[in-house]
Amino acid sequence: MKKLFWVSIPKWNKGLVTTAIESGADALVLPKGFSKKAKELGLIQTVASDGDLKLGKDVCEFTITSKEVEGEVVAAGEKVWKIIRNKDWSIIPLENLISKTKNIIQTVADSKKALLALTTMEVGSDGILLETPKAAEIVATGKVVREANNEKLQLVRATIESTEAVGVADRVCVDTAAILAPGQGILAGDSSSAMFLVFNENVQSPYCDPRPFRVNVGAVHAYVRLPDNKTGYLNEVRSGSQILIVDQRGNTFPLAVGRAKIEKRPMLLVRGKIPSTSSGQVAKTISLVMQNAETIRLTIPNGKPISITKLKKGDEVLAFTEDAGRHFGVKVKETITER
């Protein structure tokens, strides 16, 4: 579940509202009468007696002073959001509540306490409400929340077994809405259980100029990794979709797609093998149908790109693997065979 970033604006301050929106705030907690003014500055949810979420109805506030108040929080149920304030900052009440209820929004004064609240007991609160008059603290806390929401994936090495021309088919280029750094790319595979890390086009080439927003991923049927531990088909990716960007260390972040281009191109089937390990990873095959062109690249273990037209048997590239089994992109436990 995504961790929420709420910002308190107790008195109207256009600068702080703008900073909060630009820092990725999910909602603003405002006095009555200011929701419309906030929305004039950007698309943002408001929490107020006359806001999108109504204080006292959709959102309840509690100041934790005793075990009895903790009980009131739990009794409020899980259909409302519960803003938690502490008379004296203490992590113990939050630990108690995390184990008993959901929809907890912990108030914090700075980014350090935000990180603590979001990681308490390795679960954390469902979100934080930042109360600060400092624009710089809003920016810093926004960064903390974004990083807390990012998945960390354990990439593995796959050994190339073969490449094979398979004729003309439909491939998908994904153009993202931001510049990608070298080493960042998209996970894709013919199976949802094994995906190659496809390198972005932030690479100098004698054949064409770099396009650092683009990943030429693969054929329309391929699975791609999405945010929130989901997968989707490349054919479903379009303008406004969210896709998961991954680097060679397994760091990830969600990013909006600006455009997806489907065009007929000569294609190449890349096959590899992921070995078994002492930690319990089972050996499995991995494959992806990709455009047959020298500018299409996978990622080698040091984070550098390798053109798929130069791949040879025994080369190692980065991949991600998990147990097979998804239903409409959501992870499920089932017996499944993909060939």
Image: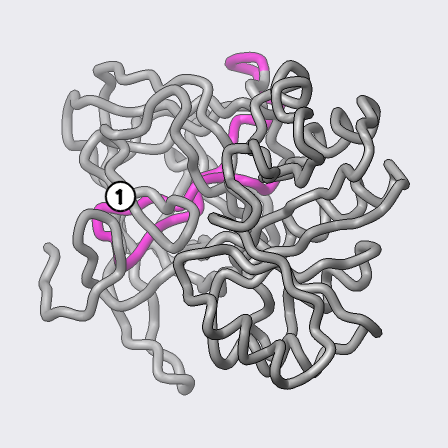
What residue is shown at x 54% (from left), y 71% (from top)?
Answer: 73
Asked if one can make out residue 249 in the rendered structure from this viewpoint, the answer is: no
- In terms of secondary structure, where does tag 1 sit? strand
Question: Whole-percent x and y of residue 125?
Answer: 59, 65
Indicate the position of residue 253 as horizontal and vertical percent values: 55, 45
- Whether 107 is drawn above or below 308: the answer is below
- x, y (%) of residue 218? 30, 32
Task: Give the magenta-colored segment's residue range.
Answer: 183-209
Percent x, y for residue 300?
A: 52, 50
Identified at 37% across, 46% down, the residue is 225
Considering the image in quadrants, where does the C terminus appear?
bottom left
Amino acid type at circle 1 is Tyr
- Please tell me which residue lies in front, 278 or 300: 278
Residue behind mark 1: 223
- Residue 62 visible? The answer is yes
Counting every numbered tag in the picture gives 1
- Give the camera-side residue of 152 and 114: 114
Q: Quadrant of residue 250?
A: bottom right
121 or 297, which is in the foreground? Answer: 121
Q: Which residue is more in the foreground, 128 or 171?
A: 128
Report whether 97 appears left or right of 156.
right
On whether residue 142 falls in the magenta region, the answer is no
Residue sitting at 75 percent across and 28 percent down? 17
Q: Residue at x 70, y 73 (%)?
A: 64
